[in-house]
Image: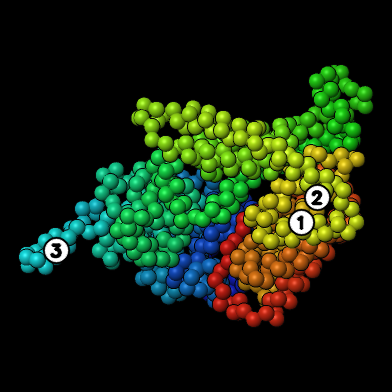
């Protein structure tokens, strides 16, 4: 088998830069120069994307950036001992020992096992001490080869002998059975963190006298835990960044859930939490599959107040609704581009009566425009049913989907709009949930989620919409639309300010989503004679682009005010902002909300006011600068965004300079966003 590391891949006591990106780029270059990767940039991009998902720094001054990449032709291990430490996100500070693991997309199991074994060796203090003392590149290679040749430490056996203790009542010696814990570790790549977390948890448990056995669901293969071991366990630890395979095996066990990196950083604390959960009858448990899962989830959510439940349901509905409307809205805009505004009046007739051999008057452009418009309109027709259906799903799980979609369809039929969809979804969800709590004979339980709940939920929720609620909601929606359509001058500017503030208030949260859903719901009502819905959509899109673009600009204008991770996030925020993804500013708001959010709102309000005042429109519900063809008054769209971006960037810089806050260096590393 090809040697994973050679002296050519080792760098000793050099300064490779100030950021993880600098170090990873140099090490990727080493791998490419050795002939094991076809290109530097492709390998760097894959490795840095992995780094952004979860920082790879671990306790002890170590970092293990790693990835699978199509650019890698042969598995490789590049190592650097830095003269200038770099912060890779470990809790105990910057790292000086960097191991860069580069694996091909289709790496064989033997290579993956060796790479995983090396990662496990790095948590051993004697090994890392020897790496720091090594004098030459060949010494490093010999140490690594030696670690890969050794057999891995054995995990504690399932039948660990119990400790003896004296009974206070009789004075006789009794046997106190040790606590038993099972764990699953898994990370997206499945090379390093999966196995390091497993070994850290086992070592911590052994010191505490706890029998802990781990199932590593990694790239080098996974051996499932014995069902008897799981059955005997007092609690479960899931240290994972991905879904646990075979989760139903642990159903009913008290569980501690955490990212895989916490298993490396805080293994003792996680074991202590698992032991406490084993003694707590109210502790969270792994849900059962099927119908019982709903009851388990309800138990978990008992602590939520009504506002939290409504927020979660609304955000779920909107998040599932967006894919229906994003593509549909873009197709409608494309239909207008190809067929003109009049395509709305002839689209049905054209798509039914014409084809490529029988083109309508106006030719191919009209025909393709009609097809694009009709597909988009049909897709947009799912807006309210999907919103209602997935709001109900958030409340009642799968049995709520059918009643929710039906209630949403009723709301659309009655012209109750997205307000009707929200109310219909909430009704359907709670009715389906209540029906699901009925105690029924065993023979009827199998029919409940697939027949009884959808049938009765649809009857009650949609019946209420038809008989009681639909008419008043439709009237309210009509009045609201008429009011917005009639807005002009100063009142339109006020609306732009309000929408701008809402879009920047919580960056993808419920307030932002309400403003967005309001704009999208009216999009299909826009026309050459009634451009108010397009004005609202243009305002919402432009304002939502301001926060990430402003944070990106701020990190360029004054780097010293931001951490290394924030500056890296700022690079990604340019693309996120340009694409109308407001969430690109969340890493900044999460660590400094009292400065970032107000600054973003100031710029968003300015952008909203300018868009409304100058008649900026959008016929597309998403896409930012990339749907320029669907933007009306494109120059002012750009000017409004740039104005808001500059104002917000200067505002956040001013607040960071003059409002007292602990130094940046003392802050914890912020969350990262991957593109």
Residue 399 visible at all: yes
Q: Residues within 10 Å of mark 2 (few under 14, many from 20)?
A: many
Q: Quadrant of the C terminus?
A: bottom right
| Residue 70, above or below 459 | below
Foreground tag (2 vs 3): 2
Q: Which residue is mark 1?
A: 499
**Badge number at residue 164:** 3
Q: Are marks 2 and 3 in contact (CB under 8 Å)?
A: no
Q: Residues within 10 Å of mark 1 (few under 14, many from 20)?
A: many
Q: Residue reaching furthest right?
A: 362
Q: Are marks 1 and 3 in contact (CB under 8 Å)?
A: no
Coordinates of residue 60 in the picture (x, y in percent): 44, 71
Residue at (28% x, 46% y) in the render: 231
Q: SS of the residue at dot 2?
A: helix
Q: Are marks 1 and 2 in contact (CB under 8 Å)?
A: yes
| Residue 64, above or below 93 | above
Q: Which residue is mark 2?
A: 536
Residue at (28% x, 63% y) in the render: 206
Coordinates of residue 295 in the picture (x, y in percent): 42, 43
Coordinates of residue 648 in the picture (x, y in percent): 76, 68
The image quadrant that residue 375 belongs to is: top right
> Taking 347 as reference, is 28 left or right?
left
Q: CA distance from mark 1 to mark 2?
A: 8 Å
The image quadrant that residue 599 belongs to is: bottom right
């Amino acid at each position: 088998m090809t040697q994973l590391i050679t002296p050519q891949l080792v760098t000793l006591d050099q300064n490779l830069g100030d950021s993880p990106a600098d170090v990873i780029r140099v090490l990727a270059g080493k791998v490419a120069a050795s002939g094991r990767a076809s290109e530097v940039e492709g390998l760097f991009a894959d490795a840095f994307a992995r780094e952004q998902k979860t920082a790879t720094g671990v306790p002890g001054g170590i970092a293990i950036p790693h990835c699978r990449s199509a650019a890698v032709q042969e598995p490789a291990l590049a190592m650097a001992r830095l003269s200038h430490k770099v912060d890779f996100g470990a809790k105990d500070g910057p790292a000086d020992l960097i191991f860069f693991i580069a694996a091909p997309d289709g790496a064989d199991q033997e290579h993956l096992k060796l790479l995983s074994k090396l990662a496990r060796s790095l948590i051993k203090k004697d090994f890392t001490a020897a790496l720091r003392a090594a004098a030459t590149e060949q010494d490093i290679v010999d140490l690594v080869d030696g670690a890969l040749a050794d057999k891995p430490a054995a995990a504690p056996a399932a039948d660990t002998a119990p400790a003896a203790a004296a009974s206070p009542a009789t004075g006789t010696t009794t046997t106190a059975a040790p606590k038993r814990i099972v764990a699953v570790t898994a990370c997206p790549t499945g090379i390093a963190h999966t196995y390091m977390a497993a070994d850290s948890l086992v070592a911590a448990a052994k010191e505490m006298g706890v029998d802990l056995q781990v199932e590593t669901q990694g790239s080098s293969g996974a051996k499932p835990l014995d069902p008897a071991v799981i059955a005997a366990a007092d609690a479960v630890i899931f240290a994972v960044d991905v879904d646990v395979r075979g989760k139903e095996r642990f159903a009913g066990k008290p569980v501690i859930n955490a990212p895989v990196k916490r298993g490396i950083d805080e293994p003792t604390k996680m074991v202590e939490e698992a032991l406490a959960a084993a003694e707590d009858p109210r502790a969270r448990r792994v849900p059962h599959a099927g119908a019982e899962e709903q009851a388990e989830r309800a138990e978990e959510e008992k602590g939520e107040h009504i506002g939290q439940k409504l927020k979660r349901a609304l955000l779920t509905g909107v998040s599932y609704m967006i894919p229906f409307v994003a593509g549909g809205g873009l197709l409608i805009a494309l239909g207008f581009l190809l067929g003109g505004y009049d395509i709305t009046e002839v689209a049905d007739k054209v798509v039914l009566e014409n084809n490529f051999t029988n083109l309508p008057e106006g030719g191919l452009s009209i025909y393709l425009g009609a097809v694009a418009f009709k597909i988009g309109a049909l897709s947009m027709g799912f807006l309210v049913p999907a919103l209602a259906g997935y709001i109900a799903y958030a409340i009642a799980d799968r049995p709520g989907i059918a009643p929710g979609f039906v209630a949403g369809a009723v709301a659309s039929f009655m012209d109750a709009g997205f307000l009707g969809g929200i109310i219909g979804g909430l009704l359907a969800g709670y009715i389906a949930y209540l029906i699901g709590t009925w105690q029924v004979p065993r023979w009827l339980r199998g029919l409940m989620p697939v027949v009884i709940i959808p049938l009765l939920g649809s009857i009650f929720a949609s019946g209420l919409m038809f008989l009681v609620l639909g008419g008043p909601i439709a009237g309210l929606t009509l009045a609201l639309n008429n009011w917005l359509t009639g807005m002009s001058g100063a009142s339109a500017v006020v609306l732009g300010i309000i929408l701008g503030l809402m879009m920047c208030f919580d960056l993808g949260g419920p307030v932002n989503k309400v403003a967005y859903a309001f704009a999208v719901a009216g999009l299909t009502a826009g026309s050459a004679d009634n451009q108010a819905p397009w004005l609202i959509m243009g305002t919402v899109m432009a304002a939502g682009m301001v926060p990430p673009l402003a944070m990106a600009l701020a990190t360029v204008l004054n780097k010293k005010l931001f951490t290394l991770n924030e500056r890296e996030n700022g690079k990604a925020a340019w693309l996120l902002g340009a694409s109308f993804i407001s969430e690109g500013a969340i890493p900044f708001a999460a660590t400094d909300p009292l400065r970032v959010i107000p600054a973003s709102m100031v710029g968003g309000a300015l952008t909203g006011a300018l868009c409304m005042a100058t008649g900026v429109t959008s016929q597309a519900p998403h896409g930012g600068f990339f749907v320029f063809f669907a933007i009306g008054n494109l120059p002012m769209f750009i000017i409004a965004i740039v104005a808001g971006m500059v104002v917000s960037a200067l505002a956040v810089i001013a607040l960071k300079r003059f409002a007292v806050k602990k130094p940046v260096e003392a802050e914890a590393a912020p969350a990262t966003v991957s593109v």
